[in-house]
């Protein structure tokens, strides 16, 4: 069982920045990958960014060149730096960890990000 604790999020004006953090209860190198998903009102959950244990980063086209996923392995923490935020980035953001040969998913509690003037 992997526990994920998120922090960050909040209200920001268009063009602003926010950083989300997600700390895992075990070494991130025991996981296949960690990443962030989001669910906007009335929409399905979508992958935002993912970082494999080997360090490969994947981004959705909608956030590429604006968001950056990174990690601090000493802290078992993954970050999502979000720049040039747009109103359409408004959503609940969920940290995800994927573990094991069966690729089981674990989820954080969710963080609200609201982009509005």
Image (tube, rainbow, N blue to C red):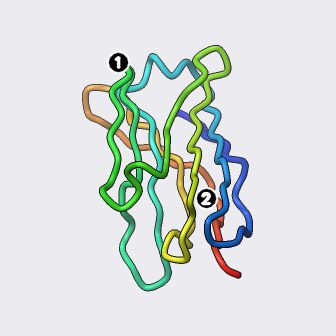
Q: Nearer the viewer, residue 21 or 115?
A: 115
Tally of numbered tags:
2
Q: Whole-percent x and y of residue 86?
A: 54, 71
Q: Nearer the viewer, residue 4 or 36?
A: 36
The percent position of residue 78, horizontal first and vertical second, equals 57, 33
Where 107 sits versus 42, above or below? above
- Provide residue 114's location: percent of width, then percent of height: 65, 72
Judged left or right of residue 112, residue 45 is left
Residue in the picture at 49% in, 49% down: 67
**Disc sitting over residue 110 in the figure:** 2
Q: Secondary structure at mark 1?
A: loop
Q: Is residue 74 above or below residue 56?
A: above
Residue 25 in the image: above or below residue 3:
above
Q: Work out whether residue 90 or residue 74 is closer to the camera in this orientation and state it.
A: 90
On the image, the x and y values in percent for residue 71 come to 55, 27
- In the image, what residue occupies the spot 36% across and 55% down? 47
Question: Which residue is situated farthest in the left direction here?
Answer: 101
Q: In the drawing, what numbered circle is on residue 54?
A: 1
Left or right of 35, for residue 94: right
Q: Quadrant of the C terminus?
A: bottom right
Q: Which image quarter: residue 27?
A: top right
Count neighbours of disc 2 (C-alpha within 10 A) and say few if under 14, some if 14 to 19, many if 20 or more: many
Residue at 39% across, 40% down: 50
Residue at coordinates 32% horizontally, 40% vertically from top-left? Answer: 58
In this view, the residue farthest toward the bottom is 42
Marks 1 and 2 sit apart, C-alpha to C-alpha, by 25 Å
Camera-near label (1 vs 2) is 1
Q: Earlier in the sequence, mark 1 or mark 2?
A: 1
SS for dot 2? loop
Q: Which mark is residue 71?
A: none
């Amino acid at each position: 069982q992997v526990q994920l604790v998120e922090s960050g999020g909040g209200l920001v004006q268009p063009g602003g920045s926010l950083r989300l953090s997600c700390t895992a209860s075990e070494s991130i190198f025991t996981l296949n990958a960690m990443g962030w998903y989001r669910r906007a009102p009335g929409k399905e959950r979508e992958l935002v960014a993912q970082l494999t244990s080997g360090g490969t980063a994947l981004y959705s086209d909608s956030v590429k060149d604006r968001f950056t996923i990174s990690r601090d392995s000493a802290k078992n923490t993954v970050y999502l730096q979000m720049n040039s935020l747009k109103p359409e980035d408004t959503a609940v953001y969920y940290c995800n960890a994927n573990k094991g040969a069966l690729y089981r998913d674990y989820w954080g509690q969710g963080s609200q990000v609201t982009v509005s003037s």
